[in-house]
Amino acid sequence: MAGSNVKMEVFGVADAMKYMRGFDKKAYNAILKEMRNSATILTTAVGGDFPQKTLTNWNGKPPTKRRNKDKKPFPLYDAAAARGGVRPKVGVGKLVNNERSILRVQQMTAGGAVFDSAGSKTNNIFTRNLDTYAPTGGSSRIGLSRSRVMYKAVDKRMNYVEAIVGRAIEITEEAVQRSINAPGKR
């Protein structure tokens, strides 16, 4: 959903995990489980940075009845849902720009995603009002990655990310050593 990138480059881990998925599925799943559990602390902290209230008349739960049945209602901002909607995505991601992701933090609620990144494709009154209320951490130019909450929240908690990735490296190394030292594998 909301897409802002805070990068920490670690070389070789994603490739090792990708190959491990093929030869030691149990170890691969253990790494994913450990990363997901560790990332819960990070996602809870990042979710806590979403504001309780935003623009007037945009807070709350969506109405139960829609006036126009053909159009989907614009997602309203619900603070509790936005705070709880930050989730980790772990695993060997697709190859994008010659890089693989092993950990991503995503906002899974529509209202939270709109609040965090609205304006990457348009610069309407709603976006300008949100920018006044909560400036973006990235560029405000159309077409570039923008974030009002997630980028700054993850960036200031890079120590969590380093710990999660560091633990993934340790587990990967242990699994590779077990595989190398296993009898009959030479």
Image: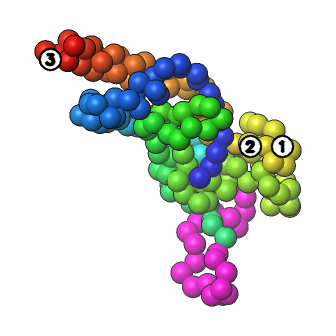
Label 2 sits on a secondary structure element that is loop
Start-end of magenta stretch: 52-73
The spot of residue 79 in percent (x, y) is 56, 55
Q: In the figure, 54 relative to 5: above or below?
A: below
Per the picture, the main secondary structure of the magenta-coloured stretch is loop
* Residue 148: assigned label: none
Cα separation between marks 2 and 3: 52 Å
Among numbered discs 2 and 3, the one appearing first in the sequence: 2
Q: Where does the C terminus fall, quadrant-wise?
A: top left
The residue under label 3 is 184
The residue under label 1 is 140
Among numbered discs 1 and 3, the one appearing first in the sequence: 1
Q: Please tell me whether residue 56 belongs to the stretch shown in magenta.
A: yes
Among numbered discs 1 and 2, the one appearing first in the sequence: 1
Report whether residue 165 is seen.
Answer: no
Q: Is residue 34 left or right of residue 127?
A: left
The residue under label 2 is 146
Cα separation between marks 1 and 2: 7 Å
The spot of residue 121 in percent (x, y) is 80, 55
Is the Cβ of the residue at disc 1 closer than 8 Å to that at disc 2? yes
Give the residue displayed 28% in from the left and 31% down from the top: 23
Q: Is residue 106 left or right of residue 151?
A: left
Give the residue displayed 46% in from the left and 42% down from the top: 89
Q: Label 1 crowding class (10 Å Cα cut-off): few <14, some 14-19, many 20+?
A: some
Q: Is residue 172 left or right of residue 62?
A: left
Of badges 2 and 3, nearer the viewer stands 3
Looking at numbered disc 2 in the image, what kind of residue is underneath it? Answer: Arg
